[in-house]
Amino acid sequence: MPVFTSDFLPTIPFRNSHFNTMYRPLFMKDIAKYSRKRITTWDDDFIDLDFSFVGSDSLAVLIHGLEGSSDSKYMTSTTNHLNAKELDTVCFNLRSCSGEDNLLLSTYHSGKSEDVDFVVNHLLDNYDYKNIIIIGFSLGGNLTLKYLGEKSDEISPTIKGGIAVSVPIDIASAEKEMDKIKNKLYLEVFFKTMKTKVLEKAYKFPEFQLDKDKLFKATKFKHLEHLYTVPVFGFESPEDYWEKASSKPYILAIKKPTLLINAKDDTFLSKECFPFEEAHHSPFFHLETPKYGGHVGFINSFKAYENMWLEDRIARFIKENIQIPIL
């Protein structure tokens, strides 16, 4: 599909990528009311789903980013906005991210789309929705695109499309960007919880031989992947993980209307994360690349009522392109 020309143009302070990235988690005050449902997985673990019902026959499945949860501000604001459009939502908390550690040594990673498939099938089997849309942010967006592509030949007709926001679709090159000094603060924020989780897993599962000295010294995602992701999930190396988990190779296989919104000033993303060629060659995949927005930011100004561009863009794509009738 043709690449969308974006109409997102924030006020001057929010044209700074870091300012826009940090403003949402630090200053936005959105709170959503959820009804939690815990489901048991095929491997004797659990996943917590946070529903927000308004009596709709359509459901949006929201998937958060790295170390996020249903309480992440982009999740609560999207939930509230879609509810106001008379759309039910469910926030999919990835394993270990719902406020309670999961039961297994393994948690989640960027390409663990089998969990998405499990949750989607649970929703199809246990709820009577006519339409389901999948919306993912950052890591959750990678899961969304990967799932829609790899399952394209067998996906339920109830799944009408997807939306992904601020997605590192090419993990190898995106991690090189994350290693740069411009992202040092973000890495420190991520590592604060990630290192704690890995330490807790090593304590609960003593058979997991963790080199704690290397964990404390880790300064790159690749270091944590060597220590945890690769051995726990059975990858051969971080490079093997990057290749198998990235969603970019699956984009051309997508057969449902799907939108990717990646800001050109997103410091998390490499040039390989802007799939213009795939968008031009796919009848289903749409790409929008605003000049500004940061990473899952897209804040317009200091006035709260003006800061719904991202949420409204999601709703417009659902209505106009996926063609689900909403307010």
Image (tube, grey):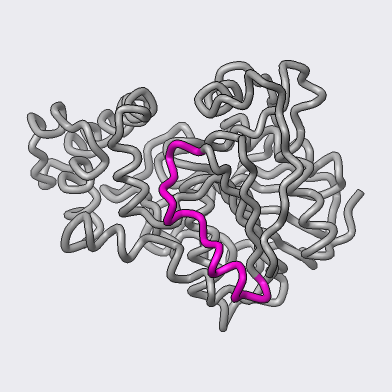
Instruction: Indicate whether 211 appears above or below 89.
Output: above
Instruction: Indicate whether 212 appears above or below 149.
Output: above
Can you see residue 33?
no
Q: Residue at x 52, y 61 (%)?
A: 275
Locate residue 128 relative to residue 262 in the image: left or right: right
Name the outermost residue toward the right: 327
Total tally of numbered discs in the picture: 0
Locate residue 224 relative to residue 129 in the image: left or right: left
Name the outermost residue toward the bottom: 153
Q: Residue at x 58, y 50 (%)?
A: 136
Residue 271 belongs to magenta span: yes
Q: Position of residue 142 (x, y in %)?
A: 48, 55
| Viewer-nearest residue: 243 or 291 | 291
Quadrant (top left/top right/bottom left/bottom right) for the N terminus: bottom right
Q: Position of residue 327 (x, y in %)?
A: 92, 48
| Viewer-nearest residue: 23 or 206 | 23
Q: Quadrant of residue 259?
A: bottom right
Q: Where is residue 82 in the image (x, y as percent from the top left)?
A: 78, 44
Q: Residue at x 43, y 70 (%)?
A: 249
Q: In which quarter of the image is residue 20?
A: top right
Q: In which quarter of the image is residue 319?
A: bottom right
Q: Residue at x 44, y 50 (%)?
A: 168
Q: Give the range drawn in magenta.
A: 266-284
Instruction: Indicate whether 139 appears above or below 146.
Output: above
Can you see residue 84?
yes
| Viewer-nearest residue: 131 or 258 | 258
Locate residue 168 relative to residue 132 in the image: left or right: left
